Amino acid sequence: MNSLEQAEDLKAFERRLTEYVSCLQPATGRWRMILIVVSVCTATGAWNWLIDPDTQKVSFFSSLWNHPFFTISCITLIALFFAGIHKRVVAPSIIAARCRTVLAEYNMSCDDVSQHGDFFFLPFY
């Protein structure tokens, strides 16, 4: 393979990788918003649960029954983590890290601009 073909292959790989990460950005943004909303709901519910004077007087399950907002938001947050939201939120970063690992074998690296989904391939010096 001559250097012109190699450059074409590298540019094609760069375009495909950029396209793939760009497609992930909207979904990643939605998952981040969902995680933020559920986390804020859980924190708000936990605050109300903890400052309630009846929480200390009744059993744990009765206390959860008296605070359905906290209970539901907490269960939702746990279900989201079991469903893998923590992986979906950082998916573009995982892909960039794996690309850096593979490209290191060829004495190259890539810089990702996460908000735009662009990758720039740089040779090591």
Image (tube, rainbow, N blue to C red):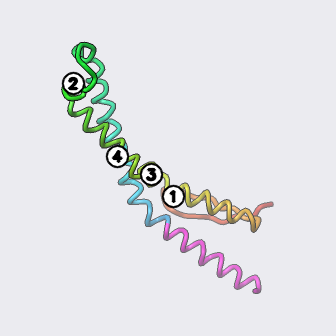
Q: Name the disc covering residue 89, or none.
A: 3
Residue that badge 4 annotates = 79
The stretch of residues the image draws in magenta is: 1-20
- From the top left corner, tell me how far across and down residue 36 is, in percent: 36, 42
Q: Does label 1 or label 4 sit earlier along the sequence? A: 4
> Is the residue under label 2 in contact with that under label 1 (CB below 8 Å)?
no
At label 3, which amino acid type do we have? Val
Task: Depth check: give the residue in front, 80 or 113.
Answer: 80
Residue 117 among magenta residues? no
Q: CA distance from mark 1 to mark 2?
A: 42 Å
Question: Circle 2 — which element?
Answer: helix
Residue that badge 2 annotates = 62
Label 2 crowding class (10 Å Cα cut-off): few <14, some 14-19, many 20+?
few
Q: Name the disc covering residue 92, or none.
A: 1
The nearer-to-camera label among 2 and 3 is 2
Q: CA distance from mark 2 to mark 3?
A: 34 Å
Report the residue at 39% width, 60% height from top. 26
- From the top left corner, tell me how far across and down residue 118 is, in percent: 54, 64
The nearer-to-camera label among 1 and 4 is 4
Report the residue at 54% width, 55% height from top. 93
At label 2, which amino acid type do we have? Ser
Task: Depth check: give the residue in front, 71 or 16.
Answer: 71
Compared with 55, 42 (above or below) is below
> Is the residue under label 4 in contact with that under label 2 (CB below 8 Å)?
no
Q: Which picture quadrant has residue 95? A: bottom right
Q: Name the disc covering residue 12, or none.
A: none
